[in-house]
Amino acid sequence: MARIEDILVPDIGGADDVEVIEILVKPGDKVQEEDPIITLEGDKATMEVPTTMGGVVKEIKVKIGDLVAEGSVILTLEVEGDAKAAKKDTSSGDSTEDEKPKKEESGQQSTAARTSKSPDFKVEEAAPSGDVYASPGVRRLAHDLGVDLRNIGGTGPKSRIIKQDVFAYVKKRLTGEGDGLQVGPARKVDFAKFGKVETVPLTKINKATAVNVHRSWVTIPHVTQFNDADITDMEAFRQKNKKKAADRGYKLTPLVFIMKAVVGALKEVPKFNASLDATGDNLVYKKYFHLGIAVDTPNGLVVPVVKDVDKKDIYELAKELGEISEKARDNKLTPADMAGSCFTISSLGGIGGTAFTPIVNAPDVGILGVSRSKATPVYEGDKLVPRLMLPLSLSYDHRVIDGAAAARFIVDLSARLGDVKGLTK
């Protein structure tokens, strides 16, 4: 006997207001369990959402451009089978519908309570949760940007504040409408007057990256410390064992050794494995070691996170790094894949360069830039011998890290990269 089932947006890492950019099925289509049905795009990634069961598509409940969250209905499906068994299988997920009225209730009282005061253009006081109509994701974004949502008019349904409203408000502040950061408006130039041009819209990832790095640059006092690490022995070990990894289907890259060394340095200088809390008055020390790894993709820079690096050996890390990098390049990262970093590594060694100044990936307080290694003559006693040296660039948040701690960190890190036995035990 056939029954009608709702197919819902699954757990997408706590993200709200994720945009539907593609609908992959139409009414009447027959789908199998795990077939992709829609594509969602968040701030830094796109993901295909599969159906949780097979059947015939009856009605599409979303359209391109809609903003959805976990539990939103995507479509209805005509499914063959026992409805009682289906209810038993899905009983653990029926809390979603119970929560929806609560969200609507909190939103309906928000419009009247919103004030019209002018912003003071400093980091603004956060609005009480009942004073505005906005999702938790928008509230988190506003908090990160230091914006009072009561100063923003919502353009979403029922005057709901959406992420685009927050970005537009911040843009006004930064381009001189109000005191802001005293940044004047950008000069308008008609580039076509000087020759042939092509205008290409920025991707959503490009735009999100621009907002994030600009916020970090103007709100975090950056200092960058440089050093060279002797990786001669590490590279010899890698060359000797890379076939072992290749036989298992993945690459043994220098990055996995750097990740292990970074964790050791984080344990030695734990302030680097901390973040300021929302008030800025407390430092939160993390007892886990999750590393963000910057990945260059055709759509822009993304930073997936490798969890529990301290609990994995170099071969496990090599396998996971290959998998997550492939997901990044295929635009299949989920918000959960990019959440929870303690420290970030940005490696440009495969491209070249001698050094650079990476921008801290807030709320991390440190980021390591890695450039291309090169053979360098080094004195051993009274003789010059060639050693393979790796340039390191450590940027850090000077509100949390002082110069002495940064120097200890990068010296400890360099020493660990020179001790291949310590990295592989």
Image: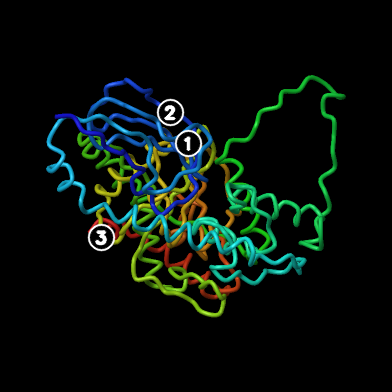
Q: Residue 96, which numbered label?
A: none
Q: Nearer the viewer, residue 211 or 113?
A: 113
Q: Quadrant of residue 5?
A: top left
> Looking at the picture, which amino acid does disc 2 mark?
Ile
Residue at 55% of width from left, 41% of height from top?
Answer: 205
Q: Are marks 2 and 1 in contact (CB under 8 Å)?
A: yes
Q: Looking at the picture, how far across and down is residue 177, in whole percent?
A: 81, 55
Q: Looking at the picture, how far across and down is residue 141, in whole percent?
A: 56, 58
Q: Quadrant of residue 121?
A: bottom right
Circle 1 SS class: strand
Q: Looking at the picture, how far across and down is residue 394, in whole percent?
A: 53, 60
Q: CA distance from mark 2 to mark 3?
A: 40 Å
In the image, is residue 164 above or below residue 396? Answer: above
Q: CA distance from mark 2 to mark 1?
A: 8 Å
Residue matched to label 1: 20
Residue at 84% of width from left, 53% of height from top?
Answer: 184
Placement of the C terminus among the 4 image quadrants: bottom left
Q: Earlier in the sequence, mark 2 or mark 3?
A: 2
Residue matched to label 2: 23
> Looking at the picture, which amino acid does disc 1 mark?
Val
Q: Residue 311, which numbered label?
A: 3
